[in-house]
Image (cartoon, coloured by chain):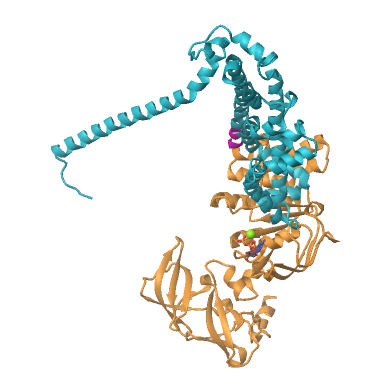
Chain colours: A cyan, B orange
Amino acid sequence: MMHGPIDATRLAAAERAAMKAEAARRRTDIVTHAILILGVVLFALPIWIVLMGSTHDVGTIARGEVPLLPGPYAVQNYLTALGEGSARTTRVPVALMMVNSFIMALLITVGKIAISLTSAYAVVFFSFPGRMVAFWSIFITLMLPVEVRIFPTFKVVSDLGMINTYGGLIIPLIASATATLLFRQFFLTIPDELVEAAKIDGAGPLRFFKDVVLPLSVTNIAALFVILFVYGWNQYLWPLLVTTSGDVETIVIGIVRMIGSEADTDWNLVMATAVLALLPPVAVVILMQRWFVKGLVETEK
Amino acid sequence: MATLELQGIRKSFGTTHVLHGIDLAVAEGEMIVIVGASGCGKSTLLRIVAGLETATEGRVIIAGADVTRLEPKDRDIAMVFQNYALYPHMSVFDNMAYGLKIRGLPKAEIRARVQQTADLLGIGQLLERKPRQLSGGQRQRVAMGRAIVREPKLFLFDEPLSNLDAKLRVQMRAEIKRLQRRLGVTSLFVTHDQVEAMTLGDRLVVMHEGRAEQVATPMEIWRAPANTYVAGFIGAPAMNFLAAELVEGGAAAKLKAGATIAFADGVHPGGEGAPLIVGIRPEHIQAGSGPGSLPLKVDLVEPLGAESLIHGALPSGETLTVRMSDCSPLAGSVLPVVLPPASLHVFDAEGRRIEAVRRRERTAAAGAVGA
Ligand SMILES: Nc1ncnc2c1ncn2[C@@H]1O[C@H](COP(=O)(O)OP(=O)(O)OP(=O)(O)O)[C@@H](O)[C@H]1O
Ligand SMILES: [Mg+2]
């Protein structure tokens, strides 16, 4: 450390440096905000265009216009989409597709969570012969998502006569290594003493699961629910293979089928369907986020 | 309320042998403190009694019934853990009531018992709170409450006070003692803190490397430690040990440091010249010159207020710690000290205590006069 006298030049220099730093900070502020705004626009613009497009008649978009302001056909477009579907291509009402997608996403989510909770519980809290084998085989399936094993899976499902059924649509997507590993990691943080205290209190394995493990996992379950629901809702490749009729068609597949040849497409209905396809995942995120935050806050207190 | 008996408890984890045959009989309502250095197997022993760990060999008998093969829930015991192990998502009430709910007690009775126990512990107003909303001391009380409310045959405590600050620890220690007396529940209490052990226990089990070195009342252990390990472990600062040999037909010890001290309590067995270890507590050493005194070269003085701790070396090179009031020599000076014969502890070369075989006539006569 130097202890020299603080002279005027040095003070002035310090002041100049401070002002420079201030100016630099303001510049970075402006730059970061500009980038942020650009990002938001890039992200929001397509959604805005789709939203606006869904309120115009079929001719507007067919003429190549990109409407940035709402048109007068909103109610009509949405009612047609929900009730009748695109007359020129699929003829499946979007309401039915949404129900199908919802059932698929919900069952995939619930199934994945249920299976991964119980398998992680078994792997963490019980010692049985082959425990590590079980754990590693779950771990290895991480490398085998549906896309990789799609042909054998398709063969099995079609041999079982499950094409065009909810079962065929959902069951192959349920087994989930990721969720199992996540819960395992969380269960490992539950202190041994808590398990032992419950044993002494007389709680058997099922009771301990229901009374202690499940309530402690609530926030994890909520977070996974959101992620898995969106994952299930957005499934494309597998439903494309196993659904060939309108009865079990999902909304993602529906949109693809609606976009037939360029000339034939009811663009206004496609846009409306796309907007409708967005709504349930958004609703789930908003709904679950509340619960998720509430869970966090309650345990934090 | 019940008796507890441990018979030849051994425990190995694979090839690591942790307990080497522990025998213990605990009377009804007795508070036994298991004390020992870290890693000596205290927790393992307690967990075997709880049924959380199975003994490799030996039997656990509670209230006359062999429970060695029973699950923890069938042993009718309650345990308080070091980190309290409260259910974080349950209120204080639910934490305390959980065991009773599982047993299927009627709601009204659960409510009454929890309220009563909570009031006993002074946590009656906290029943709606979650564990996170409590201080360490309050959590400790809840953990105690969870044990008490079950009215078990046996309380097991595994270092329940070691996460509290010093002041609270002293306070809770006294409270646990009062509660245990009042409820009269047979208890095992594990600690590595000797003050806690001395103040809490009706009897102590001093453990060392998986063996019970001595089982006796705190005062017995302090007055007549069974071996050098126990002698060094109980008492602070620790007892001094000096090398010596047996002389004068077993009537005296000749210290390597110089002096020869005649035993106050009579002749000790062993051949002439047999090696001995002589122990003396720091507070029993006195300043004083004259025959039999030893020159202590002082190298450190620690004032404790009313007393000072004096560390130094004897001519033999052995170190000696002395606790004295009204005396604080300078470091580097030489302080002559005497070891009062009546305060000596005599151990053989392996460290086992040697008792005098016969009392001297002098003490016998004094005893007769006193009577
Ligand atoms: N599950 C286990 N597997 C292998 N070794 C173990 C296991 N549990 C305990 N041990 C070993 O047994 C010995 C005794 O452990 P224990 O926990 O009983 O010690 P402790 O006396 O309670 O110590 P502390 O005062 O530190 O709690 C230690 O050496 C420990 O490493
Ligand atoms: Mg321990």
Q: Position of residue B318 (x, y in %)?
A: 47, 80
* Quadrant assignment, res B221: bottom right
Residue most extreme to the top: A72
The part of the chain drawn in magenta is A296-301
Q: Is residue A198 left or right of residue A274?
A: right
Q: Which of these two is toward me, B322 or A127?
A: A127
- Residue B10 falls within the magenta-colored stretch: no
Outermost right residue: B65
Is residue B140 visible to us here? no
Residue A24 seen anywhere in this rendered image of the structure: yes
Magenta-drawn stretch, dominant element (helix, strand or loop): helix
Q: Position of residue B333 (x, y in %)?
A: 36, 75
**Which of the two residues, B133 or A165, is positioned nearer the viewer here?**
A165
> Left or right: where does residue B1 sit relative to residue A279?
right
Q: Please provide percent x and percent y for residue B245.
A: 56, 88
For image coordinates 65% across by 75% down, the residue present is B226
Ligand number 1: quarter of image? bottom right
Q: Which quadrant: the C terminus of chain B?
A: bottom right
Closer to us: A206 or A99: A99
- Residue B325 placement (x, y as % from top left): 46, 66
Q: Quadrant of the N terminus of chain B?
A: bottom right
Q: Nearer the viewer, residue B18 or A158?
A: A158
**Figure label count:** 0
